[in-house]
Amino acid sequence: MKDCLLVLSGGLDSTTMLYEYQERIAMAVSFHYGSKHNDKELYFARLHCERLHIPHRVISLDFIGKYFQSSLLIGGEEIPEGNYDDENMKSTVVPFRNGIMLAIAAGLAESNELQYVMLANHSGDHAIYPDCRPEFIDAMSQAISNGTYKNIQILAPYTHITKADICRHGKELGLDYAETWSCYKGGEKHCGKCGTCTERHDALTEAGIIDPTIYE
Amino acid sequence: MKDCLLVLSGGLDSTTMLYEYQERIAMAVSFHYGSKHNDKELYFARLHCERLHIPHRVISLDFIGKYFQSSLLIGGEEIPEGNYDDENMKSTVVPFRNGIMLAIAAGLAESNELQYVMLANHSGDHAIYPDCRPEFIDAMSQAISNGTYKNIQILAPYTHITKADICRHGKELGLDYAETWSCYKGGEKHCGKCGTCTERHDALTEAGIIDPTIYE
């Protein structure tokens, strides 16, 4: 039964979820919010939805680039290098980004008579990003349920597993992770040095996948 | 202490809140989301912020008009006439609109180091609009608190009072309600027949205010 709307970035996690749950995903939504790597991600989000014949909406959130503070955004400071859960990665947080994306996805789900909004947050996100933690997901799911006629809920089946676990799912599905984007810098190739590049490489390696990413 | 961001429509309720809590409101945010009465409301939202020297952001949510279903939106079906809490007013619900606005306001508040997001929902909204009810406000406040570094919360001091009570506050403050907009039809004058026009007129009358609205 197709009863889910997936928030799809075009990164490794949500792309894996798209393939793993394709039988239940009626629609995917991506956001153009002015991050440095947005166009790179969206290219892959579009590619996978077309391949799987899943309707895909791309929604522009211009106001984030205009009014929000984050090194992730075009015009923001430099993306820090190092590990994904380092304190300095905090500069890449876009305030309440997942809350905003989930709220919009909930309205879109209700407009399309869908029952669930899916998000590919995982346990490695929890250290730095408050809007990826289980207690946020639970409260937001309750808010969405209370605030919609159909009591729409969030499904976040990767919340308690690691990025390496997600890669293991992808390995079983035979996914080609060269067709996903992670690097926050959004250059021509993955930089290989920022927190999300090192996290990507480590997770793929831990899952026993030869990292297909071309790094600078 | 200016620690609040107000979601301001330019209608009777949020305009009253703007004046009542002006000492605490550091910023107001309004949304252009494609409703038939949006331009009328925004005119007054701008006017009051300018008058009180409160910084005001207007954020465009084009995707709502494009992808969401509601008679409130340009291109949607006719606005129903009758009472505000009639079953037929349900067609005017924009799915999870308050959830979306509060989520964006929370991100904006965190970007501006503010602690509270204010919303002027009231008890008369509860029958028709699930995203105005206390159980939604409470859960959403918890979600915002869990999903932000500063544990931002929602303040919704009108949740348990009626629209007539709000008008009583406005009466004490000496507000001129001719400088607010309610009518969902968004014509040159208030129609006087739609649910929000009858609700407006009844609330003003109940509060002992001579309704200054020019109806068609």
Image (cartoon, coloured by chain):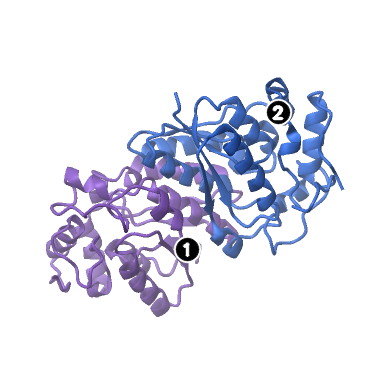
Chain colours: A purple, B blue
Q: Amino acid at mark 1?
A: Ile
The alpha-carbon separation of the residues under discs 1 and 2 comes to: 39 Å
- Identified at 34% across, 69% down, the residue is A39
Front-most of residues A162 and B14: B14
**Callouts 1 and 2 in the same chain:** no
Query: Relative to residue A15, is residue B185 drawn left or right?
Result: right
Please tell me whether mark 1 or mark 2 is closer to you in this view.
Answer: 2
Q: Chain of mark 2?
A: B
Q: Is residue B96 visible?
A: no
Q: Which mark is residue B175?
A: 2
Q: Which residue is mark 1?
A: A59
Is residue B4 in view from this perspective? yes
Residue drawn at 41 percent across, 53 percent down:
A66
- Image location (x, y in percent) of residue A76: 29, 53
- Tally of numbered discs: 2
Q: Quadrant of residue B143?
A: top left
